[in-house]
Image (cartoon, rainbow, N blue to C red):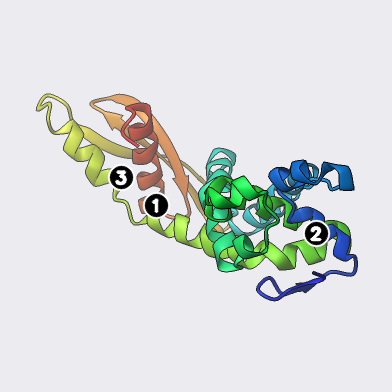
Amino acid sequence: MADFPHCGYTFRDPALLKNALTHSSYANENREKGVRSNERLEFLGDSVLGLICARYLYSEYRSLPEGELTKLRAAIVCEGSLYEFACRIDLGSRLLLGRGERAGGGDKRPSVLADATEAVLAAVYLDGGMEAARGFILDFIKEKAAAIVKSHSTMDYKTTLQEIVQKNHEEVLSYRLKEESGPDHNKVFVMEVLINSNVLAEGSGHSKKLAEQAAAKAALELMGQV
């Protein structure tokens, strides 16, 4: 039980791994043996995961504002993402489940696997420290972050906004530079998007085009379109 082949970590304390893999249904069936569920580890793992993810996003995506970082982190640490990671390391086959839970497909249930992922992460953290925990999950975080950012960056928010505004022929959409700052090699531009002469929203980026896209996205968010 000390090793977990698909996760690349060997536990010094096998009891931690066993606890992380113990679902509440199994613990309830073996209560007289003093078996504990992984729920407390899940609680800790949630915070460890959030910190690892936040630190990486803060360092890697320096141009994203706080709100976008928060959304990105939420997408990475959501149940669906953790379920995907659990499937990659074949976590379901290692879980200790009660008879009813296993018969009901608990070893494949997204919520069960996502919770167990957080529990195992906490066990790695307690057994080997923060560096070991980062080694366990960071590559997956990097991959998910890149995929999410790429999928969002391919959206043409300006075209979408233009199509909406054009439905009213009396309205004219335009963009104007509000400010720019920073050294020449790392400029930050702030662009405003206007309907007629009224500022609707603004956005920033390392080029005017990126700032315009950010402004258009902010306007679409105000309209409830994204």
The reply, left or right, for residue 220 in relation to residue 83 is: left
What kind of residue is marked 3? Tyr
In-front residue for pair 167/54: 54
Check disc 1 and report its element: helix, strand or loop: helix
Label 1 and label 2: CA atoms lie apart by 39 Å
Check disc 2 and report its element: helix, strand or loop: helix
Q: Is disc 2 surrounded by few (<14), some (14 to 19) or many (20+) residues within 10 Å?
A: many
Choose top left, top right, bottom left or bottom right for residue 172.
top left
Q: Earlier in the sequence, mark 3 or mark 1?
A: 1
In the drawing, what numbered circle is on residue 72?
none
Q: Is disc 1 surrounded by few (<14), some (14 to 19) or many (20+) residues within 10 Å?
A: few
Choose top left, top right, bottom left or bottom right for residue 39.
top right
Count of labels shown?
3
In the drawing, what numbered circle is on residue 18?
2
Say which of marks 3 and 2 sits in front.
2
Q: The C terminus appears in which quarter of the rendering? A: top left
Q: Which residue is mark 1?
A: 152
What kind of residue is marked 1? His
In the drawing, what numbered circle is on residue 157?
3
Residue 94 visible within the image: yes
In-front residue for pair 158/135: 135
